[in-house]
Image (tube, grey):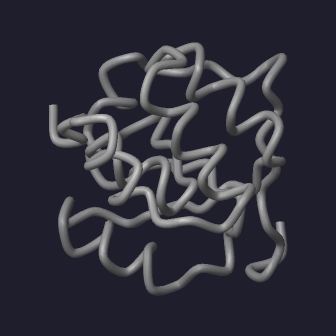
């Protein structure tokens, strides 16, 4: 594989480690559209709607002190995974807010939701 080639997430065949999905706070998963799904001693595989988001990848690398392997995922597949592993709940609010370009913090305040739970 060429160094610049981006891996693609195959939702039908890729194995997801449920414990790995919880290593990033849910609000970050939604805000950055990143989904960690596999972890080794040296790497964390992260499905990303925008795998070119180097700022987020760098922050994750610093947080976990491991190499981040960005894997491209479609937005539809991303939301399917999020709903499967986190449930619809607050995640749906992030999606709707993103779709209509409003701040999620105002939604959480309006509905008295603590997004750090």
- Is residue 18 rendered to the left or right of residue 62? right
Q: Is residue 30 above or below residue 31?
A: above
Q: How many marks?
A: 0
Q: Position of residue 64 (x, y in %)?
A: 20, 59
- Is residue 21 rendered to the left or right of residue 1? left
Name the one closer to the observer, 72 or 79: 79
- Is residue 76 rendered to the left or right of residue 69? right
Q: Position of residue 98 (x, y in %)?
A: 64, 58
Q: Residue furthest front?
A: 110
Residue pictured at 40% horizontal, 16% vertical: 18
Instruction: Locate the N terminus by quadrant.
Output: bottom right
Residue pictured at 33% horizontal, 59% vertical: 105
Instruction: Locate the C terminus by quadrant.
Output: top left
Q: Position of residue 39 (x, y in %)?
A: 38, 38
- Is residue 94 rendered to the left or right of residue 77? left
To which quarter of the image does residue 114 belong? top left
Residue pictured at 68% horizontal, 55% vertical: 71
Q: Position of residue 46 (x, y in %)?
A: 53, 50
């Amino acid at each position: 594989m060429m160094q610049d080639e981006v891996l693609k997430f195959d939702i039908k065949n890729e194995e997801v480690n449920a414990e790995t999905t919880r290593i990033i706070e849910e609000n970050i998963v939604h805000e950055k559209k990143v989904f960690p799904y596999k972890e080794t001693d040296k790497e964390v595989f992260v499905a990303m709607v925008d795998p070119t988001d180097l700022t987020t990848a760098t922050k994750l690398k610093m947080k976990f002190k491991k190499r981040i392997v960005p894997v491209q995922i479609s937005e539809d597949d991303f939301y399917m995974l999020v709903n499967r592993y986190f449930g619809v709940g607050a995640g749906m609010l992030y999606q709707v807010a993103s779709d209509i370009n409003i701040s999620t913090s105002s939604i959480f305040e309006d509905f008295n939701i603590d997004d750090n739970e």
